[in-house]
Image: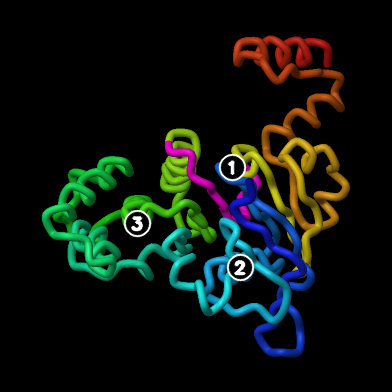
């Protein structure tokens, strides 16, 4: 079943040049799909169109079988959550607890139920010990986890991560990528992640690569990485592990995907002794 269906989507910020043009793709329910591309490729614009933050110029967006339009925008926003690039832009309350509660209050959730929901989702993102902390005192990764908890508390069917790790340090990035994987595998959520991190693509089920406002490649990560020339032509590179494997292959060392670290060290020592 399709969670998201986009067909011939076109959008312009200035009504002269299209930032997104003729974009067509679909996202299967329960999958982890990444949209990748260089800066200006149109990937974040697509995220904002899907979540109703921008209004399309033409084309169609169908979410859970309903076309996104003014009549059902409110209903569809209850089914789809978004986590932005800068977590500071999503903070409203003076404490972590207040922030997670914000969306619940807007949906008129009873106070007697609210505390349990807040504690449940704070625990899921490992922020239970910080419920009474001020958001401004948290690290970037912690802030993003709180933002995710706030989205999860609304029980969306789909979560869009719009460059959610781009402003984080390496540790923060790994924390959020691990959490996204857990949400996908443990909760069965449909994940759509807009990213410039080629390493994140390897964790997904499907990938959509964009270039100059259009879809350049759609398929599995394996299919994308197989066509290295195509990847480079749209300004992307192989993940480091695959680059390393390619370089070893040029030296006559073939590495099995199931090789252990000890086996890799042995192969490298053998190569060094033959040089």
Residue 19 image offset from top left, x and y in percent: 71, 76
Image quarter of the C terminus: top right
Give residue 249's quadrant in the image: top right
* Residue in the foreground of this view, choosing between 133 and 56: 56
Q: What residue did someone put label 3 on? A: 154
Q: Residue 264 occupies which quadrant of the picture?
A: top right
Please give the label number shown on residue 268: none
Let me know if residue 74 is in the magenta part: no
Q: Is residue 206 left or right of residue 177?
A: right
Q: Determine the CA span between mark 1 and mark 2.
A: 20 Å
Q: CA distance from mark 3 to mark 1?
A: 20 Å
Q: For marks 1 and 2, give the one nearer the viewer.
A: 2
Please say if the residues under marks 1 and 2 sit with CB atoms less than 8 Å apart: no
Residue under numbered circle 1 = 31
Front tag of 2 and 3:
2
Residue 269 horizontal side relative to residue 98, left or right: right
Dot 1: within a 10 Å radius of its alpha carbon, few (fewer than 14), some, or many (20 or more) residues? Answer: many
In this view, the residue farthest toward the left is 112
Q: Residue at x 20, y 46 (%)?
A: 119
Q: Say which residue appears at 64% left-offset and 44% top-offset.
A: 201
Disc 2, SS: strand
Callout 3 touching callout 1 (CB < 8 Å): no
Image location of residue 10, percent across then percent down: 73, 75
Q: How many neighbours does mark 3 have within 10 angstroms: few (below 14), some (14-19), or many (20 or more)?
A: some
User: Sequence order check: which comes first, mark 2 or mark 3?
Assistant: 2
x then y, percent, for residue 274? 83, 11
Residue at the spot 62% in from the left edge and 13% down from the top edge: 260
Q: Is residue 32 above or below residue 115?
A: above
Point out the stretch of residues depicted in magenta: 187-199
Q: How is the image coloured?
A: rainbow
At label 2, counting other C-alpha atoms closer than 10 Å, the crowd grade (few under 14, some 14-19, many 20 or more) is: some
Q: Which residue is mark 2?
A: 67
């Amino acid at each position: 079943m399709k969670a998201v269906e986009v067909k011939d989507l076109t959008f312009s910020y200035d009504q002269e040049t299209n930032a997104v043009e003729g974009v067509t793709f679909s996202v299967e329910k329960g999958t982890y799909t990444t949209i990748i591309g260089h800066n200006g490729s149109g990937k974040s614009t697509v995220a904002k169109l899907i979540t109703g933050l921008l209004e399309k110029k033409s084309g169609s967006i169908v979410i859970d079988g309903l076309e996104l339009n003014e009549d059902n925008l409110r209903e569809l926003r209850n089914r789809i959550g978004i986590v932005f690039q800068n977590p500071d832009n999503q903070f409203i309350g003076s404490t972590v607890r207040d922030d997670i509660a914000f969306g619940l209050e807007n949906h008129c959730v009873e106070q007697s139920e609210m505390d349990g929901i807040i504690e449940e989702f704070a625990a899921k993102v490992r922020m239970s010990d910080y419920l009474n902390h001020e958001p401004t005192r948290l690290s970037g990764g912690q802030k993003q986890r709180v933002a995710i908890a706030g989205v999860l508390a609304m029980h969306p069917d789909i979560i869009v991560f719009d460059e959610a790790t781009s402003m984080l340090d390496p540790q923060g990035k790994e924390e959020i990528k691990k959490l996204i994987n857990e949400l996908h595998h443990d909760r069965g959520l449909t994940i759509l992640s807009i990213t410039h991190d080629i390493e994140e693509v390897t964790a997904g089920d499907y990938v959509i690569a964009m270039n100059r406002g259009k879809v350049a490649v759609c398929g599995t990560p394996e299919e994308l990485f197989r066509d290295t020339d195509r990847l480079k032509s749209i300004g992307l590179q192989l993940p480091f592990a695959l680059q390393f494997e390619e370089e070893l292959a040029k030296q006559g060392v073939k590495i099995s995907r199931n090789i252990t670290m000890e086996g890799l060290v042995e192969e490298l020592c053998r190569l060094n002794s033959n040089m």
